[in-house]
Image (cartoon, helix red, strand yellow):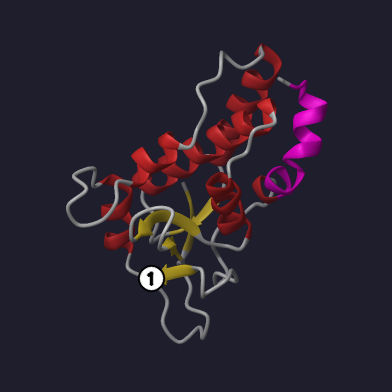
Amino acid sequence: MKKNWSEVRLAAGQLLDFLSRPTFFDQPYTGDLKTHRVIFDISEAVARFTDDSGERFEDWQDLLESVTPAWPEMPREIERRTIELLDQMTSKLYPSALNETLINNMQGDVARLLHCHAYGDVHQLWKAVQQAYLDGGMPCGWEGRYPEGRMVVFSAVHLDHEQEANTEIQPY
């Protein structure tokens, strides 16, 4: 059942609050370190996002697509608001370690999450993706074969703050 924007706003409140922040990924990832593998290597994160061969690790984009229902088009109001949010994301501040590929993937995740919330059908994996963002990480892959294994999350900042991927904050 599709919802109107007020209902989506209520259902996706935590995600929308996260998206209203002026800066993303400027703090260490605070999520569950047992159920998530945290990486700090930007090149590994990009490889996990973009490698669709399935040889080195499970194809992350295919995995996400496999748990995303095929819905009809979003209602115009929700589509318009989603596009506005995605446009606003380009004016946010990101650690300089993040590149256009990662930011574009984040925007795709946000669009699909809002779509899930609009239709009231948020798969467990999508809930985990959303929580990883809320916890300050960028979900970028799966270690093992889903559903066995665990999510891989990129963090621009180490928990101990001694080593950082490159946390100079800059506009996208």
Establish if 131 lies above or below 34. above
Q: Which residue is under mark 1?
A: 40
Whether residue 167 is visible: no
Region in magenta: 3-17
Quadrant containing the N terminus in the rendered view? top right
Residue at 64% x, 19% y is 80
Residue nearest the observer in this picture, 23 or 75: 75
Whether residue 151 is visible: yes
Q: Is residue 170 left or right of residue 142?
A: right
Q: Amino acid at mark 1?
A: Phe
Residue at 58% x, 41% y is 123
Q: Residue furthest front?
A: 148
Establish if 126 lies above or below 120. below
- Residue 161 position within the rendered picture, expressed as x and y whole percent measured from the top left: 50, 83
Q: Residues within 10 Å of mark 1 (few under 14, many from 20)?
A: some
- Residue 47 position within the rendered picture, expressed as x and y whole percent measured from the top left: 26, 54
